[in-house]
Image: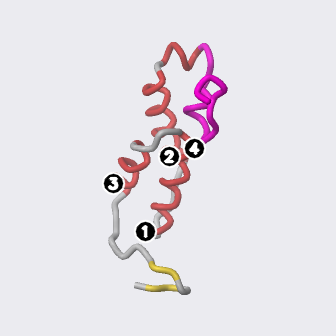
Amino acid sequence: MIKNGKEQNVVPTTRKQNMGAAKACDTYNEAVTLFRRMQHANNMGTGEDDFDELEEYFINKQGLTDYLENGLTVGQASNAQTWDSR
C-alpha cells in the first residue's frame, strides 16, 4: 500500500511483537526509537510503562552492579561508540 508517495507497513503488529523487536536492538536509544515508530505505525501509543520495561531490560543486559556504578554505558544508552571501541 502506498500513502503520501511512500510504501506503508500493512502488516499489523501487537505491542508484544513491537517490544520484542525493540529488545533485539543493540542500544536503549535505538530500542526506544524503533518501539515508538512501530507503535505509531499501528496507531498505538506509548506510555511510561513501556519505556520502564525497555530500560529494565537494558539494565539487566548490562548488569545491575555495573549499572549502579556507571549508569547506562554510552554503548547501551546511545548510538555513539565508546572511545574504547573505536
> Compared with residue 27, is residue 83 higher up or lower down, i.e. above or below?
above
Task: Please say if the residues under marks 2 and 4 sit with CB atoms less than 8 Å apart.
Answer: yes
Crowding near pointer 2: few (<14 within 10 Å), some, many (20+)?
A: many
Q: If you read the primary sequence from the N terminus, does the residue marked by circle 3 or circle 4 appear first?
A: 3
Q: Which residue is the extreme one toward the right?
A: 83
Q: If you read the primary sequence from the N terminus, does the residue marked by circle 3 or circle 2 appear first?
A: 3
Q: Which residue is mark 4?
A: 29
Answer yes or no: is residue 31 visible.
Answer: yes
Q: CA distance from mark 2 to mark 1?
A: 17 Å
- Residue 42, labelled with which disc? 1
Disc 3 marks a residue whose amino acid type is Gln
| Magenta span | 69-86
Is 50 positioned to the left or the right of 18 in the image? Answer: right
In which quadrant will I find the C terminus?
Answer: top right
Q: Secondary structure at mark 2?
A: helix
Could you tell me which residue is drawn at 54 percent across and 47 percent down? 30
Q: Which residue is mark 2?
A: 31
Q: Nearer the viewer, mark 3 or mark 4?
A: 4
Disc 2 marks a residue whose amino acid type is Ala
Q: Which residue is the extreme one toward the front?
A: 86
Q: Position of residue 6 (x, y in %)?
A: 51, 81
Could you tell me which residue is drawn at 50 percent across and 65 percent down? 40
Crowding near pointer 3: few (<14 within 10 Å), some, many (20+)?
A: some
Out of 6 and 44, give the one closest to the viewer. 6
Q: Which residue is mark 3?
A: 17
